């Protein structure tokens, strides 16, 4: 690999590392009433001393509606402990990059809260450099890097032009590693 490529990758990875490790305002995205009730159920399940102070909380279904329930099942069974996104998607939406300690209320395809996960680690890689660790943590298909690239390539492809990505292989991917912290049923 040419030295200039290594330097550019190092700068981009340093940026990603700084972005999700830096102190950022802790907020709660606007939650719908059923999501807020679910979050409150989680808080009520904790001793007062263990409740997060000013957490960042969001609610969404994983992937897209077509695959959301299948992915949700993988989270609930513990087979899926990570999820990956295009960094450009966060930038285009004006969303903050995920950070360790953030919470995600995972919704099913009908927008019903099913569980809450907490981000325990975050990693950035170019699409072409996704390691086996991430493919296994995502728990999909045969958990190989080849399957990960095929599935995520298909998932990301419809959005590449809109996000200004000409080369998916060199697109920055952000992977969140999760721990299920609440599933009331």
Image (cartoon, helix red, strand yellow):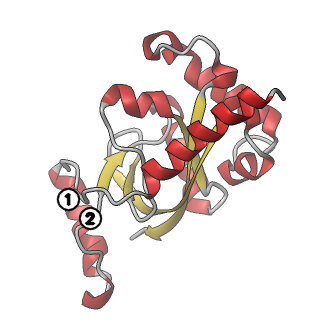
Q: In the rendered image, which quarter contains the C terminus? A: bottom left
Q: How far across and how far down the image is residue 148, in percent?
A: 72, 36
Q: Is residue 183 left or right of residue 141?
A: left
Nearer-the-camera pick, 109 or 172 = 172
Q: In the rendered image, which residue does mark 2 sit on? A: 39
Residue drawn at 38 percent across, 60 percent down? 102
**Figure check: 154 above or below 85:** above
| Secondary structure state at the residue bearing disc 1 | helix
Quadrant of the rendered image containing residue 34: bottom left
Residue drawn at 79 percent across, 38 percent down? 145
**Figure check: 165 above or below 45:** above
Asked if the residue at tag 1 contacts the one at tag 2, i.e. Cβ–Cβ closer than 8 Å, the answer is yes
Q: Is residue 5 left or right of residue 30?
A: right
Nearer-the-camera pick, 168 or 66 = 168
The reply to whether residue 14 is visible in this rendering is: yes
Residue drawn at 48 percent across, 13 percent down? 164
The label on residue 36 is: 1
| Secondary structure state at the residue bearing disc 2 | helix
Q: How far across and how far down the image is residue 175, in percent?
A: 57, 46
Residue drawn at 75 percent across, 40 percent down? 141
Circle 2 residues within 10 Å: few <14, some 14–19, many ≥20: many
């Amino acid at each position: 690999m040419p030295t200039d490529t290594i330097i550019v990758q190092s700068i981009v990875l340093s940026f990603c590392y700084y972005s999700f490790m830096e102190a950022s305002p802790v907020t709660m995205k606007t939650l719908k009433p059923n999501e807020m009730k679910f979050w409150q159920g989680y808080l009520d399940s904790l001793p007062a001393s263990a409740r997060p102070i000013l957490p960042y909380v969001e609610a969404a279904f994983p992937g897209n509606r077509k695959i959301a329930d299948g992915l949700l099942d993988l989270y609930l069974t513990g087979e899926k402990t990570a999820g990956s996104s295009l960094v450009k998607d966060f930038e285009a939406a004006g969303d903050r990059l995920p950070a360790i300690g953030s919470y995600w209320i995972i919704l099913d395809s009908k927008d019903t809260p099913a569980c809450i996960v907490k981000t325990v680690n975050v990693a950035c890689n170019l699409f072409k450099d996704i390691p086996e660790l991430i493919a296994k943590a995502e728990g999909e298909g045969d958990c190989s890097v080849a399957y990960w690239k095929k599935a995520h390539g298909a998932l990301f492809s419809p959005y590449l032009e809109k996000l200004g990505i000409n080369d998916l292989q060199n697109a920055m991917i952000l992977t969140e590693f999760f721990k299920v912290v609440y599933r009331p049923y």
